[in-house]
Amino acid sequence: MTTAEWLANCSACCVPELAGAFTRARIPYRTVTGTLVDGDPAWDVLREWLDAAHAVRSLRSSRIGFLGHTYPGMLDLYSDFTQVHAQTGAHVEVLEIDDLVERVESADAAAIERKGEEIRRTFDLAEAGIDPIAVEITPEIFEWSARVAVGLDRLVEDFELDGLTYYYRGRGGNIAERVAAGLIVGNSLLTARGVPASGEGDLKTNLGMLLLDRLGAGGSYTEFYALDFEDEFVLMGHDGPGHLAIAEVARSLARSSSTTARRGPGCRSR
């Protein structure tokens, strides 16, 4: 063994040097050991740390739009913007509903048509009567959702947003109320492309959605609805924008469960 060859392969040599420096500087650290060949678990550990670092960096440099106000009376949702910035590094951009209304009203016909095509490519439109509380998707309703979605795109672009927390009640069918009522489709599209949107003015959930999105897991504003004590599962439903990645994961799990169930007795698909 020559000195040159030893130096070329002394991957562990720097560990006590770096550890000593980090300890003196009070910088937390972890060491990962392994041979780093294909299939070695060390790769999985490193990948998890890199994914976490990417998610945290995304959060620290993010700009989160806060549009409107928090849902009245939801005391658990209230957030201190200064604390959010101090603890996460994220910037909260406070927006007026007028910022969105202006962009919705100025949306041009070509952009609305393109957005309509995107909506049809992305979603299966529900047929009338399939949901007892949903009205028929008329051409006017569809066009309005597409128009609002165009306005949302411009809002995100103009304010350089990485996420959007929103709620606005409006009154008597005014333009603010109509815009707020048409947000779901556009915000679902934003969430699908990495700009998570959270309803009811829930800023903390929006930050969680951003982290989950950057980790590749999706993330949706979700509420617990019921407990099944026999089969031991929790029924949950997303409120407002849904994350398409969750549907993709569910579809993959369903295919995997179906394959497992066909392998023989003792396995079942749920």
Image (cartoon, rainbow, N blue to C red):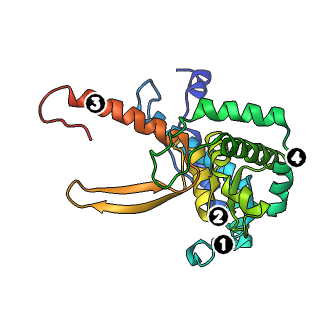
**Given the image, on which type of amino acid does mark 3 rest?**
Ser
Chain-order first, disc 3 or disc 1: 1
Label 3: few (<14), some (14–19) or many (≥20) C-alpha neighbours in 10 Å: some
Does residue 100 sit above or below 255 in this rendering? below
Which label was assigned to residue 148? none
**Given the image, on which type of amino acid does mark 4 rest?**
Ser
Q: Nearer the viewer, residue 203 or 131?
A: 131
Q: Which quadrant would residue 11 be assigned to in this image?
A: top right
Q: Are marks 1 and 4 in contact (CB under 8 Å)?
A: no
Q: Give left or right: position of 76 versus 249.
A: right
Residue at the (20%, 26%) spot, across then down: 262
Q: Position of residue 236 (x, y in %)?
A: 41, 56
* Residue 17 visible in image: no
Identify residue for label 2.
203
Q: Are marks 4 and 2 in contact (CB under 8 Å)?
A: no
* Residue 141 visible in image: yes
Q: Nearer the viewer, mark 1 or mark 4?
A: 4
Which label was assigned to residue 258? 3
Q: Nearer the viewer, residue 46 or 102?
A: 102
Chain-order first, disc 1 or disc 4: 1
Label 2: few (<14), some (14–19) or many (≥20) C-alpha neighbours in 10 Å: many
Q: CA distance from mark 3 to mark 1?
A: 43 Å
**Given the image, on which type of amino acid does mark 1 rest?**
Ser
Residue at the (63%, 71%) spot, across then down: 71
SS at mark 4? Answer: loop
Chain-order first, disc 3 or disc 4: 4
Q: Nearer the viewer, mark 3 or mark 4?
A: 4
Identify residue for label 1.
79
Q: CA distance from mark 1 to mark 4?
A: 32 Å
Chain-order first, disc 4 or disc 2: 4
Q: Are marks 3 and 1 in contact (CB under 8 Å)?
A: no
Identify residue for label 4.
106
